Amino acid sequence: MKEQNDLTLTLPNFSGPLDLLLHLIQSQAIDIYDIPIAKITGQYLEYLAKWQKLDLQIAGEYFVMASTLLRIKSQYLLPKNDFIEPEDQPDDPREELVEQLVQYSIFKKISEYLKQRNEEVPLTVSKEPSVSNENEIQPLPLGKISSQQLVDAFNMVIHRYKLRNPNAGEIKVEEASIEDMTRDLTKRLAQNKRLSFFKYVKTLHNVDEALSLFLAILELCRHQKLKIIQRKNFSDLILEGTADGN
């Protein structure tokens, strides 16, 4: 008969508290911008309790996140001040946590893509060309080399030197304002209900503008003024304005 000590449990391998939170949100199809903080906090603490019962070592960062969730939950339990105007009310206490989860989700997808590419691309190893003893450099025979051959040999040496020491230059990148890009994106969404991210990028002039566009999209998503649709992995992103963005 198998004894109780022989029980084997398989636990998810979370790389940190944000990974655990993201798992709880995605597994229940919860909107990351509207997290039910009381529900998620309870489930998070249940995970920590299970790990402690199994005598697993839990990193301190998990407890730090637990205290953060409890703090946010307590802020929701506090009564609202009716004497404060709605526009003077404090920001949503979940806002900072949501921003961290969005950034973590983006970097996690990027790392998964790079890992997949690394597994698909075959390993290549470079090797410096080797010269056999028979091809060692020998002194030039006297009277048998013409001046043109010397010129050609010299040109070849110069060409090889340039390949090994390419000309260095400085590239100036004009800074693109995130605020200007946000205004431009909002203006385009007002003219067209949907925009193609790939086509939008083609209208930009440099990488800095593309980065500003990406940050502007994140900013509008954070304020729930923009919705992003992707039909399949690595396909085009469809940018669609929300009712709140009008």
Image: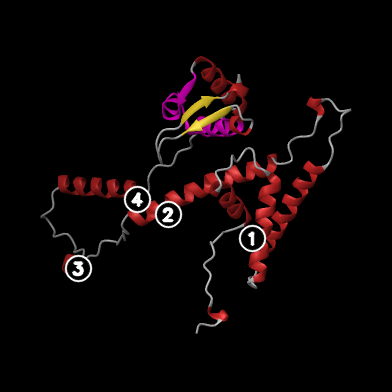
Residue neighbourhood size for the residue with mark 2, other residues' Cα within 10 Å, grouped as few (<14), some (14–19), many (≥20): few
**Snapshot quadrant of residue 118:** bottom left
Can see residue 173? no
Give the amino acid at mark 4.
Answer: Arg
What secondary structure is marked by label 3?
Answer: loop
| Numbered tag placed on residue 115 in the rendering | 2
* Horizontal arrangement in the rendering, residue 184 relative to residue 43 (left or right): left
How many angstroms separate mark 3 from mark 2 (CA)? 40 Å
Q: Which residue is mark 1?
A: 47
What secondary structure is marked by label 1?
Answer: helix
Viewer-closest of 214 and 105? 105
| Numbered tag placed on residue 77 in the rendering | none
Give the amino acid at mark 3.
Answer: Ser
Residue neighbourhood size for the residue with mark 3, other residues' Cα within 10 Å, grouped as few (<14), some (14–19), many (≥20): few
In the image, which residues are magenta? 193-219
Give the amino acid at mark 2.
Answer: Lys
Residue neighbourhood size for the residue with mark 4, other residues' Cα within 10 Å, grouped as few (<14), some (14–19), many (≥20): few
Q: Which residue is mark 3?
A: 132
Q: Are marks 3 and 2 in contact (CB under 8 Å)?
A: no
